[in-house]
Image (spheres, grey):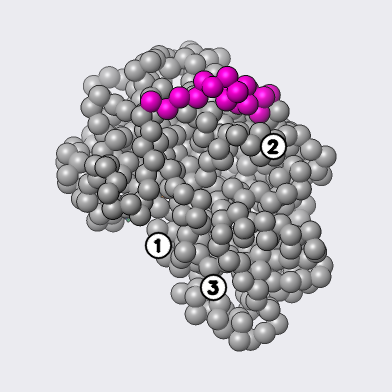
Amino acid sequence: MDVHKTSKYQANGLESNLETYDDDDHCAEEEDEGACANSADTRLMSKVIRKGLVESKLYLEIQRQDPNSPLHSVKSFERLHLKSEILKGIYAMGFNAPSRIQETALPILLADPPQNLIAQSQSGTGKTAAFVITMVSRVDTTLKYPQVICLSPTYELAVQIGEASAKLAQFLPNINIKIAVRGESISPYEQLSEHIIIGTPGKLVDWSLKFRIFDLTKIKVFVLDEADIMIAAQGHHDQCIRIHKQLSRKCQMLLFSATYDQAVMDFAQYIVPSPNVIRLRREEEALNNIKQYYVRCSSPEDKYKAIENIYGSITIGQAIIFCHSRKMAGWLAGKMSADGHAVGVLSGELTVEQRLLALDRFRMGIEKVLITTNVLSRGIDVEQVTIVVNFDLPVNANGNADCETYLHRIGRTGRFGKNGIAINLIHSQKTMRICREIENHFNKSIKEINADNAEDIEKLDSQSI
Ligand SMILES: Nc1ncnc2c1ncn2[C@@H]1O[C@H](COP(=O)(O)OP(=O)(O)OP(=O)(O)O)[C@@H](O)[C@H]1O
């Protein structure tokens, strides 16, 4: 294991308004990206591995291009023997056939007796739908207490998963879902009667261990979405482990993400008993339908000009622009607004209401551009996003490329097979080096375009549709 790699989450001296992935109670108070740092976990993980404790009893390395794969898979949702109401919900969502991860994972997810699964699949390929189908399938509505919990790193993502679950379960009578996020009120004296609880780890710790308004030992399904960041970021890690420790041995444990570095994967296999593992090969991680480019710029002003050129010349569905800090996001939003562009901004210092409003307005297309930070890098699903711009490239605490975050960011476009474009703005030798690091890591070329050159921009235009 490369212990060095995991140290990227360690504390650092970055500016205090750098944005963390998290918006949960614990980390939100500490605004530094490195504040959710993880030196204790790094030590724990390396200890686990040194001691040779990592044992995957049932390791199913899915080589997707291997036609001889022994895995059972289904080609239609009917073959899963789901309740008719769930099948109806799936079709109402417009899903006709399972995606690759769904056809591979669902037979494992729905097996009886339940099996544990650690799954990896590219962004936007239907992981959420796979675990949501499982969550609603496992509920016994005659029992009026929480039976399924799903942990997600951010407020917005928990709300999105809640909405997907409610849609999928719309024809199931008497199923109740509750979101456990900042601002959700509960009575500390009443036991929860909802069947599925979806929330951020801090809130779930409060509800289950502090107020004891539901019983973790009765949970049948535990889902960790964006599992790698939940394991690697210290605040989340501690809370997830506190919850995990209370679960019964029979509880089905499901971990999902588009990325796992090796140390995180090893740790995941240590905490999940007898897991099935679905993994991608490194060269499969970056999607071919997302074309990646970089533009050379000389300053933030010049980066802004590049955005204006691109934005003014091509048919953009919608765009998300990622900045490294709240300050930079604010600066860019101010500048674009002053120049007459309708842009939204979403970063960690906003209230949860303001954040939801910004995302809703963007989803509705009221603003075509959303300027944000890493807080929105994972999971958020807005179909019409055709372009992702990295105004600042994602870096870790050591100033090296944060390849995982990069992949999640660009995965906000190219959802479920659509075309997408990722544009990286490069303003120094250092950022060029980071760009090359990312290119080498995924072995996918990031081509140069000139934002002042009409031909180059036209090329982009043809790919954005
Ligand atoms: N079988 C299907 N048929 C059609 N659309 C689907 C299917 N499964 C999922 N989708 C849609 O594809 C989009 C992406 O799915 P989803 O959000 O589940 O991806 P994901 O793998 O969880 O992404 P991320 O890695 O970003 O979290 C969603 O809009 C979802 O509704």
Whole-number angstrom distance, CA of label 1 to CA of label 2? 34 Å
Neighbour tally class for label 3: few under 14, some 14-19, many 20 plus, Cα within 10 Å: some
In the depicted view, which residue is nearer to us: 275 or 183? 275
Q: Which residue is mark 1?
A: 417
Quadrant housing residue 162:
top left
Q: Point out residue 459 in the picture as x, y percentages from the top left corner.
A: 55, 81
Going by the numbered disc 1, the residue's amino acid type is: Gly
Q: Point out residue 98 in the picture as x, y percentages from the top left corner.
A: 28, 51
Neighbour tally class for label 1: few under 14, some 14-19, many 20 plus, Cα within 10 Å: few
- Mark 3 or mark 2, which is nearer to you? 2
In the rendered image, the quadrant that contains the N terminus is top right
Neighbour tally class for label 2: few under 14, some 14-19, many 20 plus, Cα within 10 Å: few
Residue 4's disc number: 2
Q: Is residue 63 magenta?
A: no
Q: Is residue 42 magenta?
A: yes
The segment highlighted magenta reads 40-57
Residue 316's disc number: 3
Whole-number angstrom distance, CA of label 3 to CA of label 2? 40 Å
**Image mark count:** 3
Q: Earlier in the sequence, mark 3 or mark 2?
A: 2
Q: Report the side of 462 relative to 21 (left or right).
A: left
Whole-number angstrom distance, CA of label 3 to CA of label 1? 17 Å
Going by the numbered disc 3, the residue's amino acid type is: Ile
Decide: is 355 above or below 200. Answer: below
Q: Report the side of 364 relative to 113 (left or right).
A: right
- Mark 3 or mark 1, which is nearer to you? 1
